Amino acid sequence: MPTFSHQYLQSVCRSLLVANRVKEEDAQLIAEHLVSANLSGHDSHGIIQLLVYIDRIEKGHILPDASLEILQETSTTARINGHWGFGYVITTQAMDLAIRKAKESNVGIISVFQQSHIGRLATYSITAAQEGMIGFITADSGRTVKNVVPFGGKESRLGTNPLCMAFPSNLPGPFCIDLATASVAKGKVDLAKQRGESIPLGWIIDKNGRPSTNPNDLDLGGSILPIGGDQGYKGYGLSVIVEVLSGILTGLGFGVDPEGIHNDGCFVMAINVEAFRSLKSFTKDITAFAEYLQETPLAPNSNKVYYPGELEYLTTIERKDKGIFVEEATWKSITSLMTRYGITTP
Ligand SMILES: NC(=O)c1ccc[n+]([C@@H]2O[C@H](COP(=O)([O-])OP(=O)(O)OC[C@H]3O[C@@H](n4cnc5c(N)ncnc54)[C@H](O)[C@@H]3O)[C@@H](O)[C@H]2O)c1
């Protein structure tokens, strides 16, 4: 597989986005966000998504020059219409607003609707943690096609509905829990398809509700399972919470509209630690807590106990050094787009 430096991949993303009417500064933000997903090991949310976004711009589903509108606002809350802009740009602004409100009033809570995909959630929560806040975000996929089955069913009625929380600490990397409430993000099934690989048992069922290791079964009427295996009702419950916060509280709605445009409804929150105790003592305790978790005696066949977010931090260090692999099929599609837009290797 071809391997590239993160700077090179950012530059490819930026050029392709600018060629598609995205403003320079927005293109830079989106490129950094996409490639940081590759760096952290989440290739499903990295440069591969660029192909989807360019297709959505061409179809008019993403409006690259849209600006957000605040529809309702108090000192601690706001409701935002993203007017079909890039989710990365709109939700970055929403989290910045939540942080500003939390600095003034101890908490900032924002809901966002009508925006495109927001990518890897950790980026937004980590921004809040860097400002001494607890950052929290949930996202759903609006009323577009669903991929996750409610526990006990065989038809998809939910999105992969991720949630993420990050806490300030003195650790070298972010202390951050960032996960889909489904057994896996859909992008990981798509990636396995692109790479011609089978997937682990427990990720999906086929259209008849039977367990499958074939990633192609998902698009043939199959579904992703909620997290938890035979305890999947707990993942299902978490998914429902995310759907209520991101879909129903935002006013976006639930279920599928066959005409629906992909639309990441979001619930964004920043909580000022200083409203409860000093930031210094809190970060000291979070750091000690992470170390306490890491020092847990190991189970047989385990090499290490990680704190949440540690794997992504270690992978980022490694990939900054050794480069990022991009599968042949994705790279071929990207280079053909570069040719189409007359972009020479930056
Ligand atoms: N925007 C969207 O619509 C959308 C939808 C779904 C998922 N996503 C993103 O996809 C990404 C992948 O989600 P996922 O659920 O497939 O990720 P995942 O299954 O890899 O879980 C990631 C989380 O688990 C932790 N983790 C992983 N292995 C660990 C270990 N061995 N020990 C301790 N902690 C461990 C990670 O630090 C991280 O917090 C996330 O960044 C998520 O935000 C986005």
Image (tube, grey):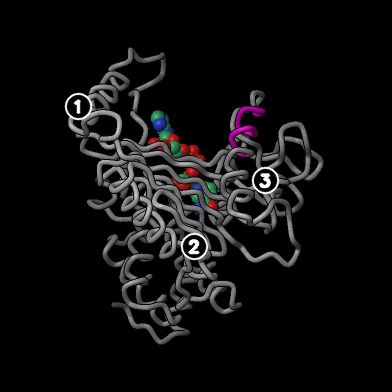
Q: Quadrant of the N terminus?
A: bottom left
Residue 88 vertical position relative to residue 198 in the rendered view, above or below? below
Distance from mark 1 CB to nearest ligand 1 atom below 8 Å: no
Q: Position of residue 332 (x, y in %)?
A: 48, 70
**Segment colored magenta:** 232-239
Q: Position of residue 134 (x, y in %)?
A: 34, 39
Q: Which residue is mark 3?
A: 158
Earlier sequence position, callout 3 versus callout 2: 2
Label 1 CA crowd tier, 10 Å (few <14, some 14–19, many 20+)? few
Measuring 41% from the left and 57% from the top, which residue is drawn there? 94
Residue mark closest to the camera, 3 vs 2: 3
| Label 3 close to label 2 by CB (< 8 Å) | no
Q: In terms of secondary structure, what is the magenta stretch mainly?
A: helix
Numbered tag placed on residue 49 in the rendering: 2
Earlier sequence position, callout 3 versus callout 1: 3
Residue 230: quarter of image: top right
Earlier sequence position, callout 2 versus callout 1: 2
Marks 3 and 2 sit apart, C-alpha to C-alpha, by 21 Å
Marks 3 and 1 sit apart, C-alpha to C-alpha, by 40 Å
Residue 103 vertical position relative to residue 210 in the rendered view, above or below? below
Label 3 CA crowd tier, 10 Å (few <14, some 14–19, many 20+)? many
Q: What amino acid is at disc 1?
A: Ser
Residue 236 is covered by the magenta coloring: yes
Task: Please say whether residue 123 is visible from this viewpoint.
Answer: yes
